Each structure stands twice: as C-alpha cells, then as structure tokens.
Image (cartoon, grey):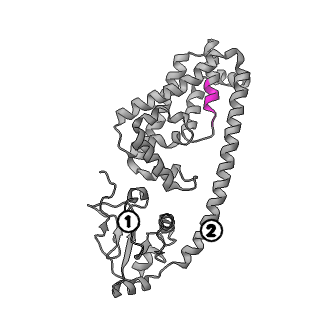
Amino acid sequence: MQETVDFIARHGYWLLIGVVLGRQACLPVPANLFLIAAGALARAGTFSLPAIIGLAVITFVLADMAWYGAGRRWGNRTLHFLCALLPHPEVCAGRATTVLAKHGIRILLISKFVVGLDAVAAPLTGAARVPISKFALFDGVGAMFWSSCYAIVGFIFSNQLDQVAIHVVRLGAILLAAAAACFAFHLAKRLRNWLHFVRLFRLARVSPQELLERLNRGDKILLIDLQGRPSHHSPESPAIPGAVRIDPWRLEQYAGVEIPSSEDVVLYCASPGEFVSARVALALRKRGVERVHPLAGGFQAWRNLGFPVSASPAVLPNVFHRA
C-alpha cells in the first residue's frame, strides 16, 4: 500500500482523475484503493481532502454524463452493449429498467457501491429521459457518498494503511474469485445453449421462395421485420408486404404482446447472416414461442430475387418510442 501512496504523491491529482475515468470506462481499476491512499496523503498534508473528494465527484459526473448521453441517444442499445458479457442481455436490460421503475432515480445514490448496477445506472436514466439537471444532482450526491467513504477511511487510518489494504484486497480477491467462477459457469452454459440453438435455428429456416408461396396461399404467418428502430413517421427501409416492424434492441418493451401458439412466426433482418434474427428467435423461444422460422438470407435475399416490397411497413402498436 505504501508504494501506492508514493506513486500517487508523485503524480498528483491527475492520476486520481485518470483512475476515476478508468473505473467509469468499465476498466478493472482499483479506484477505491487510490482514494484511500489519497486520503492518507491528505492527512499528511500532501493533498487537500475536500479537493480529493470534489475532484473525484466532478470526474464521476462528467464521465457519467457521457454514458447518460449515450443512453439518451441510443436507448437500450447502450444497455445491451454493457450487458453483452452477461448470459441474457435482454434480461439484463429488462431488469435494469425494472429497478429504475421501482426505485426511481434514487438508485444513483447507491449504484456505485453495487457491482453491475454502477455500469448501467447512467445510461439507464438517460434512456428513461430523466432530466439532465436531476440526473447530475443525484449522480453527484452518489459520487460524493462513494468518494467520501474511501477517502475518509484513508484519512482516519493513515497510520494503518497496510492493514486496511490487506482487508480491502482480501475482500476484493474473494469477490473477484466468486465473480470469475459465476462468469465462467454462465459463459459455458451460454455457449452450450447457443450451439444447440444454432443447430435448431438452421434447420428451421425458410427460403424466400417458400415464404412467397405460403403468403400467396394465404397461410397464417406473423411476419416480423427486424431491420431497425421503428418509427411511425419515417420507416428506415422498405419491408416485405404484410410484415410488422419492431425494434430488435428493445425486445423487453413487447413483453405484453401475445403470439398465438397456432401461428407461425417468420423473422427477417437486413443482415444476410441473419444475426439479428437469430438473437430475436432465441428470445422468442425462451418465451415459449416454438414455431419461429428465420428467413434464409434475410431481406437482402428476398429483394435480390425481385419479390414484392412495401415502402411503408406496419409498426407494432404501443411501441416504446420517444421523440
């Protein structure tokens, strides 16, 4: 721990700024240990304790503002990006949204103490269109609470930093080992499930010719367009006639939509590799929708064959959409 204290003393406040920015960039930086060491240096007169806390809070808020802006602009796409390493990204985003709905913006007061929640809290409030002034206030208070706890520990126990560091490192090692074991288990389970699904996914595909034939025959098919974020005013791209466009990045918003078990569902996206269709098909299977069929080659294959397209695709009612 003494080496950490000496390192911080040599590099000053800029190092503290870098550590906080690294933490908010989801890097494995031990920002708490640096704040403890900075607090000890404040006790020795090298730093100012109010300056340490104030600088940490300002850096936290500015970094979180960037995540808030990303959430406000791209919505749940940002949450899915941050949840990508978890077993079920859609579930992660859905649970995060539920936490905000239940506890409100007050989650920002304690989010930095909760592993996982600290990563999604800022973009989550941005996606929920929380006023930026309200976000900055609650985020600042939460950052001050978190920063003060560690900096004051270092200030009070400056003569016992080695003992404090040992306990902090031991606790961190235990938590890290537990998190690594859980991650490895979920990753292995996810890989197994994904490989099984990919096999079923390929077997269930329908060709553009088969789909056209079934549509002309009048078969009952729910055709879902996954080409992008839906808009009632300006759809982003043409679609197959009769298709309903949804936002593949906000699947949790359609949780209340019922799909009859007797109805076949055909998905298509803009990617010839059908990557988006595969993800949505897997989500529908988990909801109990068994008769899900991706369109082989996606919309590009349909269009390349000269099959009919519609310039104004329908949009699923009650879509979660804010201007």
Q: Report the amino acid beneath label 1.
A: Glu
The residue depicted at 53 percent of the width and 28 percent of the height is 146
Q: Is residue 41 left or right of residue 292?
A: right
**What's the CA distance linking mark 1 and mark 2?**
28 Å
Mark 1 lies on residue: 258
In the displayed orientation, state which residue is furthest to the top: 45
Q: How many marks?
A: 2
Dominant SS of magenta comes to helix
| Secondary structure under the numbered disc 1 in the rendered image | loop
Circle nearer the viewer, 1 or 2: 1
Residue 176, x across and y down, in percent? 68, 41
| Front-most of residues 289 and 176 | 289
The reply to whether the C-beta atoms of the residues labelled 1 and 2 are less than 8 Å apart is no
Residue 262 position, x and y percent, is 41, 76
Q: Could you say which quadrant of the image residue 261 lies in? A: bottom left
Magenta stretch, residue numbers: 29-35
Q: Name the residue located 30 percent from the left edge and 75 percent from the top edge.
A: 310
157 sits left or right of 250 in the view: right
Residue 273, above or below 85: below
Identify the residue at horizontal 72%, vertical 32% (top origin).
170
Q: On the image, which quarter does residue 244 sit in?
A: bottom left
Question: Is residue 212 found inside the magenta-colored segment of the image?
Answer: no
Residue pointed to by mark 2: 195
Q: Secondary structure at mark 2?
A: helix
The x and y percentages for residue 160 are: 71, 17
Q: 199 above or below 9?
A: below
In this view of the protein, which residue sits in the foreground, 261 or 47?
Answer: 261
Q: Is residue 72 left or right of residue 88?
A: left
**Do we see residue 70 in this rendering?**
no
The spot of residue 319 in percent (x, y) is: 33, 58
